[in-house]
Image (cartoon, rainbow, N blue to C red):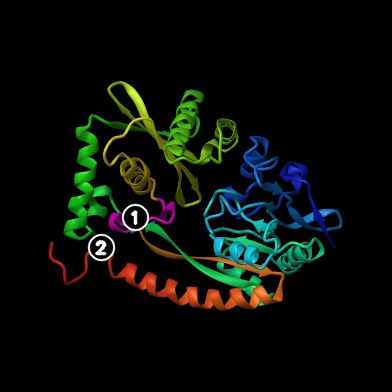
Amino acid sequence: MRLQLYDGVAAVPPSAWPAGDGGVFVGREWLAALEEAGCVGGATGWQPLPLALERDGRVEALAPAYLKQHNRGEYVFDWAWSEAYARAGLQYYPKLVVASPFTPVTGHRLLGAADGQTPLIAGLRQLVDDNGLSSAHVLFPTADEARRLADAGWLLRDGTQFHWRNRAYAGFDDFLATLSRDKRKKIRQERRRVAEAGVTVRTLAGAEIGDDDWRLFDRCYRQTYLEHRSAPYLNLDFFRLIGDRLAGHCVMFVASAGGRDIAASLCVTDGDTLYGRYWGALEEVSCLHFELCYYQGLEYAIAHRLRSFEGGAQGEHKLARGFEPERTVSAHYIADARFRDAIAGWLQRERAGVSDYVDQLFSHSAYKTLAQDE
């Protein structure tokens, strides 16, 4: 048995990549597409370094690890930690991150055989210690993986997202009927505004998404980043690659008005879950974001009997649209014992705050209670 560090996802033979329930976002096709398209690697600050546990020449377990030069694209925000290191005259970067880049989705991060997780966790720590890195971070692992990491001395950090659960709804109106009157009215008003603006939406799935659609989506995606004065993480090459290799997982909603395509959103299906990933618009239409990023996805999930719809990170506004709070977790190994103790105390205080925050969110649920009338 040995640990092997690969110079990128492409260096791991397809036949060696652990199969199973890791999910599309840590599958070799998705991660290799990011690499081939130049979204990671090079000067992006994401250097792919998959760590594999090998036995008799076979990969038994693997962690999709990246050497990071910044904290962008992680969705677990550690600015305060890096600032504390800087004030102490220490280097926080580079750090090691185990994640699916730009993808705040909970799933397996220690892939392959379950009995390979413990040596893999030890290998990640060894990488940090042997190379003088500040830390290692496993983002959005499963609950079982988080427990194993905690048992190995890693610090756990709580987070919150907003997910929608399908309660066997017969249709969108059936879903609306479970909401309080004011929330139901608000959603209908928002959808009406989009329709009254002359906007229609078509759904494309799998092979129905052609190259023209990917080019449109890329234009919309880049335009929205430009309007927010930031640089997009992804590019047309990546979208084309997943459209070719992972077509069966892709769902696109395209909005048109006056004979022009004006906006699009991209979702990914994996198992019984729909994941809202990216969106963009070339023209501004009131409430179009809610229509393409939430309501179209909810209709699709109901029609295809999917169990849940995850709309992405953050967004308290999702609460009023039927999404509910969901706990997330990340795990952190801090090499410096002084900072490890300080961050452990900080996390304990943050955890209490997160717990109170989630309790408050549930008290503002969009769903009817017994005390509410129709």
CA distance for labels 2 and 1: 13 Å
Label number found at residue 207: none
Residue at the extreme top:
259
Q: Is residue 84 left or right of residue 287?
A: right
148 in the magenta segment = no
Q: Is residue 41 left or right of residue 159?
A: right
| Front of the two marks 2 and 1 | 1
Q: Residue 366: give x, y in percent of width and height.
A: 26, 61
Q: Residue at x 74, y 45 (%)?
A: 8
Residue at screen point 49% across, 41% down = 230
Residue 92 in percent (x, y) is at 67, 61
**Residue at x-position 34% and y-position 23%:** 260
Label 1 Cα neighbours within 10 Å, binned few <14 / some 14-19 / many ≥20: many
Task: Examine the rendering and report whether any part of residue 265 can be seen.
Answer: no
Residues in magenta, as a range: 306-322
Viewport quadrant of the C terminus? bottom left
Give the SS element for disc 2: loop
Examine the rendered structure and indicate whether residue 5 appears above or below residue 283. below
User: Where residue 38 sits in the image (x, y, percent)?
Assistant: 65, 36
- Please tell me whether residue 312 is drawn above or below residue 255 in the rendered image: below
**In the rendered structure, are the residues bearing label 2 and label 1 in contact, judged by CB atoms less than 8 Å apart?**
no
Asked which quadrant contains residue 180, the reply is bottom left
The residue pinned by badge 1 equals 318
Q: Residues within 10 Å of mark 2 (few under 14, many from 20)?
A: many
* Residue 156, image x, y percentages: 58, 71
Q: Is residue 367 above or below residue 200?
A: below
Which residue is at the far left?
Answer: 373
Q: Is residue 320 magenta?
A: yes
Q: Which mark is residue 367?
A: 2
